[in-house]
Image (cartoon, rainbow, N blue to C red):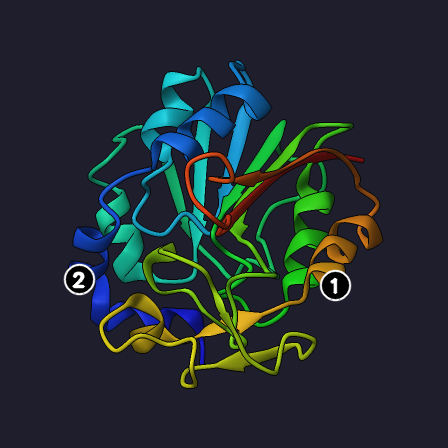
């Protein structure tokens, strides 16, 4: 099922569920990406929660998402941002179009994350940065019941399988994944997607490790 079909019926709910970036995500963009006067692609921008921060950092922002309903909400956040409907693994831009690429919480939504990272590499200019923030594969997936990232994850079989899932012990009855499902990549294939696309990983963090018992997010920056 296309990502657009997964999210289109839940835009109102999603906007309430995720009204903006978290403090940790904002901090990552400030430290990993920083200020710039070039063009930054927000790959899988959704409702555009990162667009205002990217604009405040000085970047000219282009947002891409496969869901027109999500882009409709994104248009309200930064009037001057260019928003394009396209699949993340088939971008309508020439090689070397962007000075930076940011992608937040996308690997759990797309069916072919290595292809998405490959497209990010293709459209990046020179050694421009790619900044990624998303779910921690070790503690978020079909194998781990970690509802709202509270307490200690309860682990189950299935970590090593790369698969799409929409039920099982990891799925709470009222959350996002009960509505749209998720794709799981173990940590090795997740990191391999960047390395196979020709990136070198410069920084890697497990977010929330200091203020919770287990981290549920990871962040990295990479360059070719």
Of residues 127 and 194, which is closer to you in this image? 194
Give residue 189's mark. Answer: 1
Horizontal and vertical percent position of residue 6: 35, 74
* Residue 7 visible in rendering: yes
Relative to 162, say whether 70 is above or below: above
Where does label 2 land, which residue?
A: 13
Give the foreground label among 1 and 2: 1
Of residues 77 and 144, which is closer to you in this image? 144
* Residue 81 visible in rendering: no
User: In the image, 142: left or right of 117?
Assistant: left
Residue at 45% x, 25% y is 27
Horizontal and vertical percent position of residue 91: 58, 54
Dot 2, crowdedness within 10 Å: few (<14), some or many (≥20)? Answer: few
Horizontal and vertical percent position of residue 50: 37, 36
Tell me the quadrant of the picture where the N terminus can be found: bottom left
Tell me the quadrant of the picture where the C terminus can be found: top right
Of residues 183 and 171, which is closer to you in this image? 171
Callout 1: helix, strand or loop? helix
The span from disc 1 to disc 2 (Cα, nearest Å) is 31 Å
């Amino acid at each position: 099922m296309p990502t657009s079909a997964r999210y289109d019926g839940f835009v109102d709910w999603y906007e309430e569920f995720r009204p903006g970036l978290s403090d940790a995500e904002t901090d990552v963009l400030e430290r990993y990406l920083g200020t710039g006067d070039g063009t930054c692609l927000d790959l899988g921008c959704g409702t555009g929660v990162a667009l205002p921060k990217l604009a405040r950092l000085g970047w000219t922002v282009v947002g891409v998402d496969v869901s027109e309903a999500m882009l409709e909400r994104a248009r309200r956040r930064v009037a001057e941002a260019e928003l394009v409907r396209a699949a993340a693994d088939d971008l309508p831009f020439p090689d070397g179009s962007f000075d930076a690429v940011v992608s937040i919480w996308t690997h759990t939504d797309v069916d072919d994350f290595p292809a998405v990272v490959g497209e990010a590499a293709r459209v990046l200019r020179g050694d421009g940065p790619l900044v990624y923030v998303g779910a921690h594969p070790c503690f978020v997936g079909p194998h781990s019941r970690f509802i709202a990232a509270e307490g200690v994850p309860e682990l189950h079989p299935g970590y090593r399988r790369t698969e799409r899932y929409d039920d099982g012990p990891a799925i709470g009855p009222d959350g996002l994944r009960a509505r749209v499902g998720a794709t799981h990549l173990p940590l090795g294939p997740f990191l391999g997607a960047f390395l196979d696309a020709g990136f070198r990983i410069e920084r890697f963090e497990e977010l929330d490790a200091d203020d919770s018992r287990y981290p549920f997010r990871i962040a990295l920056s990479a360059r070719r």
